[in-house]
Amino acid sequence: MKNKKITYQDIELGQMAFGNPVGQFECPEYVEAMVAYILNEIERIYWNKNQKEWDRNEDPKIKGIEYCPYYWGENKKEARELNFSFGEVGLRWYKYFGRSMTLNVSKNEKEWRVWFDACLDHIRKQEPHF
């Protein structure tokens, strides 16, 4: 089953009041769990490359992965950035990961698994080899 389209009832009042961008589709809990795992894997590889913690408030600079934490400032252009993207998939969240997450694409469960595996494979290729 594909993801459901977002309606005004699905987004938070703050998102509407401040004009925060949202994706077109809801983010199912299992996709949220996949992305949480992906972020943990980025954190692990970040440590191996930099020997310091990734605090998730900065771009981990992994080629092919776009990461931008929630933008708290006034610059409308910067506020429009996706919080996370890989391939054709872009995610947004409100203030903190896991809060009012939305997607730019709709996929069925099998398509999400294929995307997840491709994303992990891509990230793991960034692993430093000592």
Image (cartoon, grey):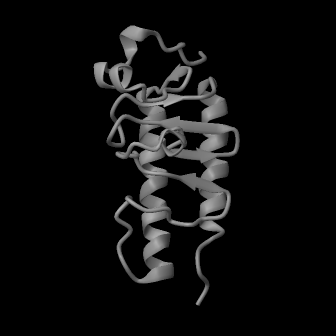
Q: Residue furthest front?
A: 74
Residue at 60% across / 62% down in the picture?
Answer: 123
**Residue 27 % position (x, y):** 47, 27
| Direction from residue 58 to residue 109 in the image, left or right | right
Left or right of 105 on screen, residue 103: left
Position in image of residue 34 (x %, y %)? 48, 42
Give the vertical position of 75 relative to 52 (above or below). Answer: above
Task: Using the image, determine if residue 2 lies above or below residue 102.
Answer: above
Indicate whether 15 appears above or below 45.
above
Q: Total marks drawn?
A: 0
Which quadrant: the C terminus?
bottom right
Which residue: 49% across, 26% down?
Answer: 22
Query: Who is closer to the viewer here, 122 or 104?
Result: 104
Q: Which residue occupies 29% across, 18% down?
A: 13
Residue 109 is left or right of residue 31, and the answer is: right
The residue drawn where x is 61% and y is 84% is 129
| Relative height, residue 60 to residue 18 (above, below) | below
- x%, y% of residue 46? 47, 72
**Quadrant in the picture for the N terminus:** top right
State the residue lying farthest toward the left. Answer: 13
- Which quadrant holds residue 10? top left
Give how far across and how far down residue 99 sits, in percent.
33, 33
